[in-house]
Each structure stands twice: as C-alpha cells, then as structure tokens.
Amino acid sequence: MKLANLNGRGTVVTESGGVDLAVASDGRIGPDVQPLYDDWGAVRAFAAGLAGATATPFDEMQLASPVPSPRQVFAIGLNYASHAQETGAEAPSVPATFTKFPSSLAGPFDPVELSGATVDWEVELVAVIGVRADRVTEDDAWTHVAGLTVGQDISDRTLQFAAAGQFSLGKSHRGYGPMGPWLVTPDEFADPDDLGLGCSINGEVVQDGRTSDLIFSVPRLIAELSAVLPLLPGDVIFTGTPAGVGIARQPSRFLAAGDVLESWIEGIGTIRNHMVARGG
Ligand code: ZN
C-alpha cells in the first residue's frame, strides 16, 4: 500500500490515482494523516479492501509530507561506511543519533529556503513506525514499521558544526526535512533492506548508494533505539546518508538558489525540491 498526504487528507495511491480514505470509509478513517498511524492496523485492513475502488488522478504538487507531525524524529549520522570515510570519521559503534525538530519537516515538492552559503544535501531512507516499539528485537522490528519513504536531511553545515556541534539545530531550519512522495508499506518491496537510493542536482547525480550498505539497518536501528526509549506510532527515523555530500567534495560544494534537488529510492519514488534564496 502507498499512503499519501494529499492536501492534508490521507489518500491511498493506486496506479490510476488517489482514493481518499475518509470519503471511502464514510468518515471512519481520516481525513487527517498523522492520526492514521495511531490506528495503523485498521488503516491497513481497510486499505486492503480498496482494490476495486475508483481512484482520482491528482497533481503531485498537492502532496504534503506523508508524516506531517510525528511526536519524535530520529536521525542517524555516519550510517554508511562510505560516508563515514569521506568525512574522515570512524564508523560508529552505536547509532550516532540526533533529531530533526518536527516543524522542520516539509512536503516532497516544497521549495527549500536556503539559510546560508553552506547548505548541503543528504538523501536518506526514512522509516516510519506503525506499531509502538518498546524493547523490540531485530527479528521483530519490521512488524513495527508502517512503511518507508524518501527523505532529505538538508543540513546547514556552518550551524551544524558551531558551538562544538549543533546537529539537531543545523538540520532543522524551516523546510529542511522534505519527505515523500508517499509512504510505501514494507510488503511492497522484494527486499526492504536493499534499496537503491540517490540524488541529483540539476540532473547531475551526486549520491548513489544502496541501503544494504547501512551500518545499522532499519531493524537494527529499531532494536537499538527502542532499547533506550519507546518508539511511538508515526515516529520517523532518518536512517543516514551514503557518500557524496557536498562538504566532503574537493572543493566543497553547496546548494545555491535556483538548484533543483531530486532524491529517489527504488520502489518508493522521487521527491524534487527547488532551492530558493531567503525571502526569494
Ligand atoms: Zn543525515
């Protein structure tokens, strides 16, 4: 199942368009998107019966974040050996965890207002919790996942490294967490632990990796994080970025107004964000 946030309304995406959950269920489910994750089993069961429902074509520009207001957002640094290597850091022995504050999240085609001259890209697989996870094992972890989506962990490198490290703030400027275009449930993937992902700037591919190279896989992250605190329905985990970020390039390269950043993951889709100058 693919679940989209179409103009603030929970929408199941099919080959021919979208099915509005609230309309199809006579108001029993939806329309608000975030609460769907609190009753995820019922949403899945209802959506499974929508195979023959009439879908309406929609404009992708009407899509908002498939997880608009999570209670917790986890983000993992240095989770690909290739990226740890390019930054000169050692691969971590526990997940290097910070947050993107929830109000920094944005829609899949929203413009990104640049906060300065050192704003960088990080394409990431994003896992969304569907069933509360408290001290779950790696083997059981996928059953707690609602689905996967594409995310960009946009990072203001100057603020990120200010004051001996401000990862959470430096990655939480307004709009610095575009996600989408929709959530895809784990059963839709032949192997949800091995997905190609990448991003391009103005058509030039700058990141190209596979999630099978994650140091801490999605199940491992859920086991490690839920050993510390419960993960709640609708929580979001940005799982880290592969090699190819701008700060690690020789010379460094950063996002500029006018740039078009496209980010994709195999089996999910592509998000596209135009970079705009502050106040532009
Ligand atoms: Zn990141």
Image (cartoon, rainbow, N blue to C red):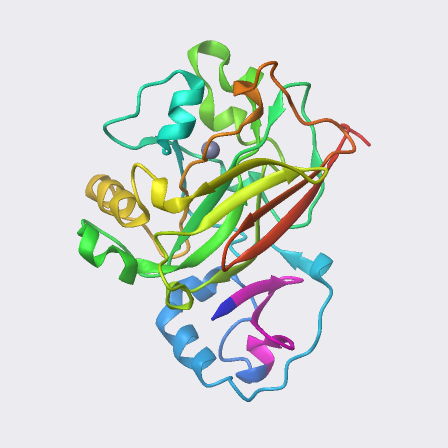
- Magenta residue span: 3-23
Q: Is residue 4 magenta?
A: yes
Q: In the rendered image, which quarter is residue 233 located in?
A: bottom left
Residue drawn where x is 42% and y is 44% of the image = 210
Which sits in the foreground, 208 or 181?
208
Q: Is residue 112 at least partly visible in the picture?
A: yes
| Relative to 108, residue 112 above or below | above
Quick one: which residue is furthest to the bottom in this view?
52
Where does the C terminus fall, quadrant-wise? Answer: top right
The image shows residue 64 at horizontal and vertical percentages of 63, 55
- Marks counted in the figure total 0
| Relative to 93, residue 39 above or below | below
Residue drawn where x is 52% and y is 83% of the image = 25
Q: Is residue 136 at least partly visible in the picture?
A: no
The image shows residue 111 at horizontal and vertical percentages of 72, 41
Which sits in the foreground, 246 or 160?
246
Residue drawn where x is 79% and y is 33% of the image = 258
Quick one: which residue is furthest to the top in this view?
163
Which sits in the foreground, 265 or 133?
265
| Relative to 57, residue 229 above or below | above
| Relative to 214, residue 189 above or below | below
The image shows residue 154 at horizontal and vertical percentages of 57, 33
Which sits in the foreground, 243 or 69?
243
Left or right: where 167 falls relative to 223: right
Q: Is residue 33 magenta?
A: no
Which is the main secondary structure of the residues drawn in magenta?
A: strand
Residue drawn where x is 70% and y is 61% of the image = 60
